[in-house]
């Protein structure tokens, strides 16, 4: 029995040393990764070529664009007319896809909005659209939802309706980066 406890004590010592070595290795790996991430954040400069990036995406840049008109406010049924006026003023000919909701008032409306956006994205893929010109009348939160669902996909160009509106109604702001 004494041999068993001697053997067990040795195994216990080996396991203890292995645990300490594993802990030290984990600490070093995590510390190095954190240092690397902090260095990347420090080295990440501000977007210096924004004007160039913005102008590069301005206008129609692909073969099959679409205008996407979203009306998410209860006081307006559609912004299609405004979008058509803008497209005419630019001399652009592209189809207009719409999504109209009577506001975003509760969780059920948000769920309906997200599902409708997903359906539109699938439809855009099915129809082979190569870029989206996005016009929104609605709350800012809707824009963040759209950005999260349409990011890293096809180019999405954002338009703004300033107050007072210029003769062409909308202004190009920037691509969805």
Image (spheres, grey):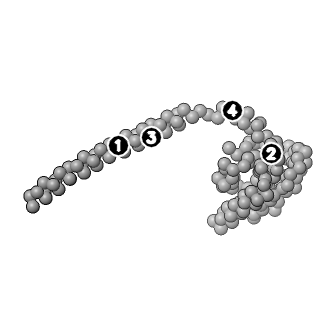
Spatial distance from mark 1 to mark 3, Cα to Cα?
Answer: 12 Å
- Circle number at residue 33: 3
Sequence-first tag of 1 and 2: 1
Q: Quadrant of residue 128?
A: bottom right
Spatial distance from mark 1 to mark 4, Cα to Cα?
Answer: 41 Å
Q: Residue at x 70, y 46 (%)?
A: 176
Sequence-first tag of 1 and 3: 1
Location of mark 2 (residue): 62
Circle 2 sits in a helix, a strand or a loop, which is it? loop
The percent position of residue 64, horizontal first and vertical second, equals 82, 50
Q: Are marks 2 and 3 in contact (CB under 8 Å)?
A: no
In front of the other: 13 or 147: 13
Spatial distance from mark 4 to mark 2, Cα to Cα?
Answer: 22 Å
Circle 3 sits in a helix, a strand or a loop, which is it? helix
Location of mark 4 (residue): 49
Sequence-first tag of 1 and 4: 1
Mark 2: few/some/many CA within 10 Å (<14, 14-19, 20+):
few
Q: Residue at x 25, y 51 (%)?
A: 15
Spatial distance from mark 2 to mark 3, Cα to Cα?
Answer: 41 Å
Name the side, left or right, on which 44 lies relative to 38: right
């Amino acid at each position: 029995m004494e041999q068993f406890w001697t053997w067990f004590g040795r195994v216990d010592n080996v396991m203890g040393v292995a645990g300490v070595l594993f802990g030290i290795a984990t600490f070093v790996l995590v510390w190095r990764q954190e240092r690397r991430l902090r260095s990347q954040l420090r080295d990440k400069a501000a977007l210096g070529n924004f004007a160039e990036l913005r102008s590069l995406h301005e206008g129609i840049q692909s073969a099959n664009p679409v205008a996407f008109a979203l009306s998410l406010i209860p006081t307006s049924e559609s912004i299609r007319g405004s979008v058509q006026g803008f497209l005419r003023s630019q001399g652009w000919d592209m189809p207009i896809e719409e999504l109209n909701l009577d506001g975003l008032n509760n969780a059920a409306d948000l769920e309906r909005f997200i599902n409708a956006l997903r359906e539109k994205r699938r439809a855009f893929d099915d129809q082979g659209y190569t870029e989206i010109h996005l016009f929104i009348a609605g709350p800012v939160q809707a824009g963040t939802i759209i950005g999260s669902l349409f990011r890293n996909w096809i180019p999405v160009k954002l338009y703004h309706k300033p107050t007072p509106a210029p003769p062409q109604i909308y202004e190009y702001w920037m691509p969805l980066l």
